[in-house]
Image: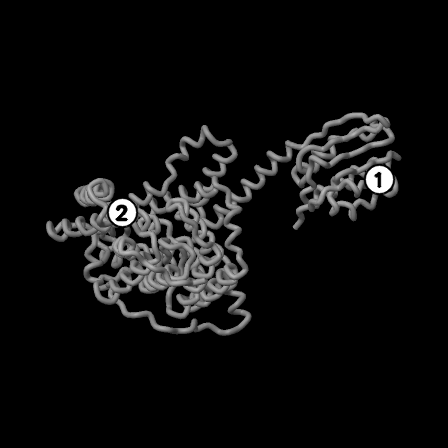
Amino acid sequence: MFEFPKFSNHSVKNDVLSGLTVALALVPEAVAFAFVAGVDPMVGLYAAFIVGLITSIIGGRPGMISGATGAMAVVMVSLVAVHGVQYLFAAILLAGLLQITAGLFKLGKFIRIVPHPVMIGFVNGLAIVIFLAQLGQFKAPDALGNLDWLQGEQMMLMLGLVAVTMAIIHFLPKLTTAVPSSLVAIIVVTGLVQGLDLDTRTVVDFLRTMSGDEAATLAGSLPTFSVPNVPLSLETLYIIFPYALILAAIGLIESLLTLTVIDEMTGTRGQSNRECVGQGVANVTCSVFGAMGGCAMIGQSMINVNSGGRGRLSGITAALALLGFILFASGLIEMIPLAALVGVMFMVVIGTFEWATFKLARRVPKQDFFVIVLVTVVTVLTDLAVAVGVGVVASALMFAWQHAKHIYSTNSMNEEGSKVYEINGPIFFGSAANFLELFDVDNDPQDIIIDFATSRVVDHSAIEAVDTIAERYSKAGKKVHLRHLSQDCHALLNKAGSLVEINVQEDPIYKVVSQ
């Protein structure tokens, strides 16, 4: 199942260069999410390395980048604040086990029930979230230590460097695709800032601002093995289980949706269940090496794919390069201007957002466009898991409402003087009430035939509706013949007694769908 990939010379070059680009963009993201969760920056950097490496090797989507994410960090903050970081590691351990279980039971396939409008809303919402997250880089601490917007020359310089970065990324591929344009842009802008001694904020400035420590550095050591130091008791399980369940769900939803997006971009297909296992193994490993855990990152995955990274080597390179930066080259990474990384992420936003959404307003059903907008807004205001859940529920309800109106009957009288109701359309919870309104019990003749040949009894509500109409005719003393009714309905039709005839011989073989 977990075969190690083979690489061509062409893919090695592309994957290595794109992996290096991603590693540079991972640094400030991992640091920022660590502070969001209320843990040390190294806890976030270790997570980016461990999750990125393991999912790249055994995950289900080559070319997809995983690491510490904001969606999971916002769930962690309250657990860390109340119970401490060791309980976070325990929660990540349990979340990883839940994710592995989901993969082994092949639950990843349920990502297919997410409608396309929800996917578009997810992508648009994350693009907006990524954009809003970058705006914080345009702020710096004032004399009182409060973050405030850059002013005057500093703001103009920041905007100028961002524009240069974006221009290089946009125009360089028109000249050559030998190297990733994002990597070239970061190197060129860093060279300009260092060579011209420009006064602009760098990665180390960001780290020191976030930590409040003027001596803070990205230099670190290898993570060490340590089992989470928490009591092995039911009380501990009671504390961590709700967090673990939410973290596992958010991690899988974001990872599998990102997998689907990358599938569409590359014209290939990832393995959702294998990705569940890979994410779970990565998070379990994080928990015993002092890391905060994580999941797939759509922004970094977009950078990787757009830079030419298609294989597992790109993610492996990104993870190992990030570790190399921490161990040996922290000084070089710390001098990268934030403007260069902001420019890269702005280009990710432009490439991620589904700009055709605005045209879809006139081309798709109104309810689908409503779902797109709804999921986008909820993603920005709350989190991904809530947004996807809301989108799926809204889509299902609107689907049910539309199909509830499709049921009707064709009525006729046969040679024996019986009235025939030929039911058309599915009978389910949404259409059951409309089904009952099709019949005129008081004015119908003594002999009634209800034919379900062109209908389907979908759920228990439908079975009860059939039972109800049979009972109504029974109380009126009229004979009812139910034809082409699914076998599953027979057992429940016990209230109508001998006045109801079920034509078993003509029944087709299909089953009611019930949960």
Q: Secondary structure at mark 2?
A: helix
The quadrant in which the N terminus is found is bottom left
In the rendered image, which residue does mark 1 sit on? 500
Q: Does residue 87 appear anywhere in the picture? A: yes
Asked whether 503 or 87 is in front, the reply is 503
Where does the image place residue 36, in percent across and percent down from the top left? 37, 56
Question: In this rendering, is residue 229 above or below 1?
Answer: below
Rounded to the nearest angstrom, the CA distance separating label 2 from label 1 is 71 Å
In front: label 2 or label 1:
1
Contact check, label 2 and label 1, Cβ < 8 Å = no
Q: Is residue 66 found left or right of 451 in the rendered image? A: left
Q: Residues within 10 Å of mark 2 (few under 14, many from 20)?
A: many
Q: Residue at x 88, y 35 (%)?
A: 477
Quadrant in the rendering for residue 5: bottom left
**Kind of residue indicated by mark 1:** Val
Question: In this rendering, is residue 380 above or below 318?
Answer: above
In the rendered image, which residue does mark 2 sit on? 344
Q: Residue at x 40, y 54 (%)?
A: 61
